[in-house]
Image (cartoon, grey):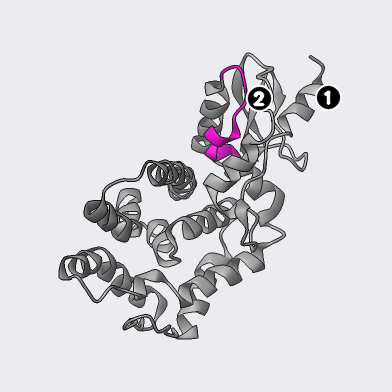
């Protein structure tokens, strides 16, 4: 197959999230359903390899680099990221299914849009911090309250020291306002992140509903499993009370794969 055809077929893959927009593309399950409405491209390559490129890494399909939907050549700064991309492309069978490729979707989105939307992403993160769900604990039942405290209070206490302020805890459903000092401190921390770290932090934020949990992961205060458990406290409680729902379980599994891809990016940069 000619190189031009190869590139064009790779570019059929979707980009993923669009920073600053709140529509169906922000929800990984909705995004997958949109993709599944159109026929999947056939696998057209045999070998998936990695090559070094000016301090970065490219994934090659039969010797040709993969490209993003905006036709940018995909190059990532960490070998662990390239290995994850390689594994996703190598795992495709007769068709290329983007729903099974969370790292590919994340990297496409990052390369095509994060740098241009940097300030908008930072603004959204700060807005999330002002309404972080860790500051909205339940008032009952007692077992849920205690479980939330066990997972959330250590993060809040630690973040107060890191950001130089005190978080206001909501009582009931009324919204609370947080000190803008902490938002500006978080912005200063994340202003220096490269586009891959910032894109990953944004994905983690939208998946968990918290700006503090990705911050805790980035600073290695929590590991990945602890972040996921903290984000899933309420959902786990509902499952215990009412049982599992098949569709909800599928959505959760899909979200976890996106979560793991974004967490890998943070971990790869930290190491």
Looking at the rendering, which quadrant does residue 194 occupy?
bottom right
| Disc marking residue 60 | 2
Q: Is residue 30 left or right of residue 13?
A: left
Q: Which residues are magenta?
A: 93-104
Q: What separation in Å lies between label 2 and label 1 (alpha carbons)?
A: 14 Å
Residue 186 in picture, x, y percent from top left: 49, 72
* Point 39% across, 60% down: residue: 219
Give the answer, above or below, for where 110 lies relative to 230: above
* Mark 2 neighbour class, 10 Å CA radius: few under 14, some 14 to 19, many 20 or more: some
Q: Is residue 69 left or right of residue 205?
A: right
Q: Nearer the viewer, mark 2 or mark 1?
A: 1
Seen from the viewer's position, the closer of residues 183 and 91 is: 91
* Point 21% across, 70% down: residue: 145
| Label 1 element class | helix
Q: Is residue 271 left or right of residue 119?
A: left
Give the answer, above or below, for where 61 lies relative to 55: above
Q: Which residue is mark 1?
A: 4
């Amino acid at each position: 197959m000619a190189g031009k055809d190869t590139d064009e077929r790779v570019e059929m893959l979707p980009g993923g999230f669009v920073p600053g927009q709140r529509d169906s593309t922000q929800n990984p399950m909705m995004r997958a359903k949109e993709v599944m409405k159109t026929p999947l491209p056939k696998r057209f390559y045999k070998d998936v390899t990695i090559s070094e490129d000016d301090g970065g890494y490219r994934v090659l399909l039969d010797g040709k680099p993969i490209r993003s939907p905006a036709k940018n050549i995909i190059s990532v700064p960490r070998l662990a990221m390239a290995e994850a991309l390689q594994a996703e492309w190598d795992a495709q069978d007769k068709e290329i299914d983007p729903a099974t490729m969370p790292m590919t979707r994340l990297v496409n989105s990052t390369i095509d849009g994060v740098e241009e939307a940097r300030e908008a992403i930072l603004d959204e993160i700060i807005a999330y911090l002002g309404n972080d769900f860790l500051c909205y604990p339940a008032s009952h039942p007692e077992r849920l309250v205690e479980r939330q405290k066990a997972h959330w209070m250590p993060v809040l206490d630690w973040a107060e020291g890191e950001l130089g302020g005190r978080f206001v805890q909501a009582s009931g459903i009324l919204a609370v306002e947080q000190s803008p000092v902490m938002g500006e401190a978080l912005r200063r921390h994340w202003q220096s992140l490269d586009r891959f770290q910032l894109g990953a932090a944004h994905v983690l934020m939208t998946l968990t509903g918290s700006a503090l949990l990705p911050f805790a992961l980035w600073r290695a205060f929590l590991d990945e499993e602890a972040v996921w458990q903290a984000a899933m406290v309420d959902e786990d409680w509902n499952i215990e009370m009412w049982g599992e729902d098949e569709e909800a379980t599928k959505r959760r599994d899909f979200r976890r794969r996106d979560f793991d891809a974004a967490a890998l990016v943070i971990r790869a940069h930290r190491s």
